[in-house]
Every structure is written in C-alpha cells, then in structure tokens.
Amino acid sequence: MTAPTPPIRLLIVDDSAYNRRNIADVFAGSSEVEVVGKAADGEEALRLATALKPDVITLDLEMPRMDGFTFLRILMSKQPTPVIVVSSYSQKENVFKALELGALDFVAKPTAQIAPDATEVREQILAKVRLVRSLRPTFVPPVSSRGRGMSGSFAADGRPQVEGAPQSTQRYVAPKHLVAIASSTGGPSALLEIFGKMPVTWSGGLVVAQHMPDKFTRTFAERLDKKGPVRCSEGQDGDAVARLTGFVCPGRQCMEVVLVGNEYRLRVGPATSNDRYVPSADRLLKSAAAAAGPRAVGVILTGMGDDGVEGAKAIREAGGTVIAESQETAVVYGMPGAAVRAGVPSRVLPLPLIADFLANLPG
C-alpha cells in the first residue's frame, strides 16, 4: 500500500480577521491543504513560521508592527518558504517588490477584502497553494537584486547611459535577433534577471508572453524597463519592435509579431477560441518564427502547463533557436519540461546561462 500524501501545511498572514477567516474557509474540508496557523502581523508570522515550519504562506503586505516586506526579507534569509502574496489591484507596485524579495506568486483581489462569494479569487488562492506540490525539490525562492549585471553611468531613472544607445527619436533599427519568451509561475523574477543582463550594445529585441492578470502587466513592464538598457513597455497594437526594445503582452490579450516592410510590428488583440492560454506563448512564438525565421530565438522559462511548445516547434522548423530552462533553476518545470519531452529545444540551460546566451547573441 502506498502511504497517503500528507496535506500541504498552510500559514495565513493577514491583518484582517475577516480575510484570514475567508482564506481559511477556502480550504475547509480539503484533504489536500491543512491550515496550521494564522497571523495578524509580520512579527507573529515569523514566530509561527519558525515553530510550525509551514509548506506555504499566504501573505498580506500592508500590516501593522511588521509589514510584509520586512517579514519576507527575514523569512527568506532564515527559513526560505514559498510565499503567495494576496494583494489588491491598487498595490501593483508592491506585488512586484515582493516578488523581487522572494515571493513565489500572487493573487489579485479587487478590493481590500476577500468577499465570501469572490469565487475567482478563492479559486486562484486554492490553485496557487496547490502549486507547491509542483515546485522543484530543491526549491529556493528567487531573490532579485536591482541592476545586477549592469555597468556604466546611470541617469536619474537608473537607466545606464552609454554612447550609441538608441533613443526613441532615432530612426527604426531592426533587431538582429527576435527573442520571444514564454513564462508563467516564477517568470517575473527570471525575466528581471534576463533583462538586467542585456548589455547596452545588444542588437536584439524582446517580446514576452507572461501569464499574469491584466491590471499588472503594464506595471511589470515598467519594472523590467528599469532593469537595464532595454526599453520595455506593455505592448500595443502597431508598436515597432526595434533593437534594444522589449514588450510584455497585455493581460487577457494575445500578442503577435508581424513583418511590415522591413519592420517588426506588434499585433495585439483578444484571444480566440483556439488559444488555450491567455496570453498565448504559442501564438507569440509562432508569429516570431513566421516573421524572423532563422533570426527567431524562442525561450521557455518556468511555469505550469505546456504553453509555448507548439510555438517552439515552429521556430525550430523555421531554422531558429529554442532554449528551455533546465530543471535545476525552473521554479516549476511544467512548461520547459514539456518542451524537453517534445524534443524541441536547441539547448537546455539554467537561468543564468540563458541570460548569458541571449546577452552574447552575435550582432
């Protein structure tokens, strides 16, 4: 007889007793998840985390006495544990700060409170907590350091200032390589590392399909924009993908790259019935294959599911290059693992080497 799988042990951290109760109710009667503790602030949460050693923690960021950011810093230095941030739409910037401090993922709630009938939010909390079962056995929360891998002088906004870097007023310069990236859970931290390593002399362009709620993709693109010389923004229909530019697909939309004359342009619009994921990495990578052919580079990073596999096949068939993140660094090996099983990657690399590979693409 196979021993039954023990339940996932959950610690709930929120200064609202109402929210703590409603999150706990999500798992009432569940054999998969056991709520082992509840904390009203960061100090109490640290004591309980040390004593209970939970498998996962749901975390509100704005709390009295010790806020969520201080809690995260101390937790990740002493007892790294998967953390799911539960935050309102109004705290978008705080969510990405928490991800850089090591939080695994987040759930967006429309207001400060989690209503008992907020079915979508409750289903997301349940799904994200269950995700802990899919983490790599040696999982350590990824912690980003701002500006890692950059050098040179900096402007007031933190962007490197280098002679010869393209400016928005200059004429269009087509990228030598069109890099299309697919990512989901764990992707924000991985993308921050990649964008932070691109040199000012880089001759490529980046397009990203990151599975993320629609109200967060613009803020995330702005955060990527500050990591290095790549000018990054949320993609809009008709945007030109030039050298040293990057675009994040808007949430609840799909993005493609098309060749218009000698320029790469974005096509952004609603999903179709054929799109299994939104944003769709398959659509983005397939379009990169059609537009750039052998100059297309597909990258499949951490995430659940198999989005990007069909697009990666199209890139390989067009003579391009496909890279999958290796199991040793992927937070969740679903997406890159599916690509490896399908036999489509040209290379399987850990995240730091993916960033190095892209940074050193020939001009």
Image (tube, rainbow, N blue to C red):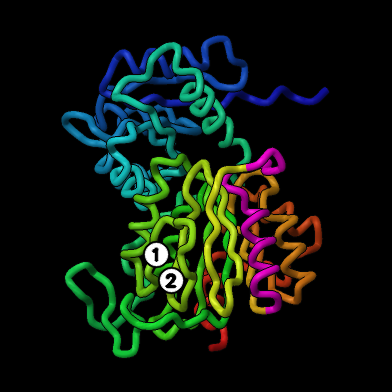
Q: Nearer the viewer, residue 126 or 241?
A: 241
Query: Which residue range is magenta in the image?
Result: 272-294
Going by the numbered disc 1, the residue's amino acid type is Cys
Residue 275 on the magenta segment: yes
Label 2, label 1: how many angstroms apart (C-alpha)?
6 Å
Tell me where residue 230 sits by quadrant: bottom left
- 307 w.r.t. 165: above or below: above
Going by the numbered disc 2, the residue's amino acid type is Thr
Q: Residues within 10 Å of mark 1 (few under 14, many from 20)?
A: many
Report the residue at 49% width, 27% height from top.
125
Q: Is residue 23 left or right of residue 325?
A: left
Q: Is residue 277 left or right of residue 38?
A: right
Q: Residue 261: horizontal and vertical position, in percent?
A: 58, 77
Q: Residue 138: tell me if it is visible.
A: no
Q: Is residue 135 left or right of residue 70?
A: right
| Residues at discs 2 and 1 in contact (Cβ within 8 Å) | yes
Q: Is residue 253 left or right of residue 49?
A: right
- 165 w.r.t. 254: above or below: below
**Which residue is the site of mark 2?**
245
The circle drawn on residue 232 is 1
Q: Residue 294: tell me if it is visible.
A: yes
Report the residue at 52% width, 79% height from top.
175
Q: Residue 82: horizontal and vertical position, in percent?
A: 46, 40
SS for dot 1: strand
Report the residue at 56% width, 82% height from top.
176
Tell me where residue 23 sits by quadrant: top left
Q: Residue furthest right?
A: 1
The circle drawn on residue 28 is none
Q: Nearer the viewer, residue 88 or 143?
A: 88
| N-term mark: 2 or 1 | 1
Q: Nearer the viewer, residue 218 or 78?
A: 218
Q: Residue furthest front?
A: 261
